[in-house]
Amino acid sequence: MEAAKLTGIERELVLQYLIDGNVPVTVTPIESPEEDDGGKVKPATSALFPIAIKAEQLKVLEQGIILLTNPPQNVKNFIDKKARVEFYFNRLGLYFETKIKQIKAGLALVIPSSISRIQEAVPKSRPTEFAAQLYFSVNQKTDVHIDCVPAEGYDIFSKPVWKDIAEGAQQKAKAYLEEFIVHARQKGVAGSGVQLIPVVRYLSEKVSKIESVQGRKSPLETLFVNHERIVFGQKTGNVDLQDGTEYALEMSFPMPRPLTERKIFATCRIESNYYDDEKEFVCVVCRYTSLQEEDMRFLYEKGTGEKLV
């Protein structure tokens, strides 16, 4: 779908809003092919993660130039490269494309003549091997629930390993892991600790995504499932899940014909909430408090490929 561009008057209003209000932006380098010495096109090798720029790290000039002051170090890797800049204007997601330039005053982004609205994303077809719903009670209503979907890029039934974490995020992930292991041991909920690897991966790699409309509730992202725990990730403030609170959980697994699907009903308690340094994202580690023995066996075998003895 073609992006809806702002009119000239709308752009001027947005530009003045940026000048007056200094709002945070997200910068995502746009991948482009590189050429080797022989002139042949080869894929870009850099990992292109979105980069969050805080309001205090930028200044918007009257000329329509965004100056970056003390930006994250990795922004400098994309000087003279094209980038997509996203931000909110009165809860409406907007973006433009420009180049990151090195100037005497530092790094700069020129706001182009064309600014567009972020279009509603068409949901990607997700693997159908797992779906879940977490139920909780609100004002005596027990049928209130939130959907849980597999997080993109996570093999939720495999044993997490360190190499799953992007190389550029491993230093931050290591610091989180050291902190969270101490916390989990103090609470007596560390177990094998394997559930903390997807937690630190999520919190070290995740960058806030600008959506078409700000503040919409989103499904929980399922990061890991085994026969003892289930781990979710979400943006802080999306769904409030309290430490120590028990919830009902329904998990669905498609089955080969003639069966249609297997449903597992359980209850689980929040062991811990883990936040990133900016308190922008949170991972929720839940331990099952009731689970049928045959369902425990099913989850164990699905995750390990071995029979539970």
Image (cartoon, rainbow, N blue to C red):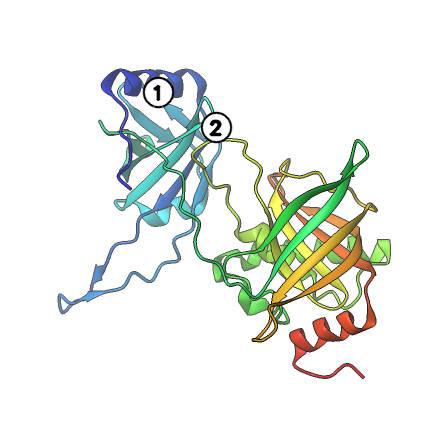
Q: Earlier in the sequence, mark 1 or mark 2?
A: 1
Foreground: disc 1 or disc 2: 1
Q: Position of residue 50 (x, y in %)?
A: 43, 46
Residue type (three-letter) at the residue carrying disc 1: Val
Horizontal relation, residue 65 to residue 208: left or right: left
Horizontal relation, residue 60 to residue 34: left or right: right
* Quarter assignment of residue 200: bottom right
Determine crowd level at label 2: few under 14, some 14-19, many 20+ residues with C-alpha closer than 10 A: some
Which one is in front, 235 or 204?
235
Q: Position of residue 34 (x, y in %)?
A: 22, 60
Q: Position of residue 275 (x, y in %)?
A: 67, 45
Horizontal relation, residue 91 to residue 288: left or right: left
Which one is in front, 223 or 263?
263
The residue shown at (50%, 61%) is 153
Residue denoted by label 2: 55
The kind of secondary structure element at disc 1 is: helix
Residue type (three-letter) at the residue carrying disc 2: Ala
Q: Is residue 45 above or below residue 301?
A: above
Asked if the residue under mark 2 is in contact with the one under mark 1, i.e. CB atoms within 8 Å, the reply is no
The kind of secondary structure element at disc 2 is: helix
Residue that extends furthest to the front in the rendered view of this protein: 258
Residue denoted by label 1: 14
Q: Position of residue 105 (x, y in %)?
A: 32, 30
Which one is in front, 219 or 63?
219
3D distance between C-alphas at marks 1 and 2: 16 Å
* Quarter assignment of residue 201: bottom right
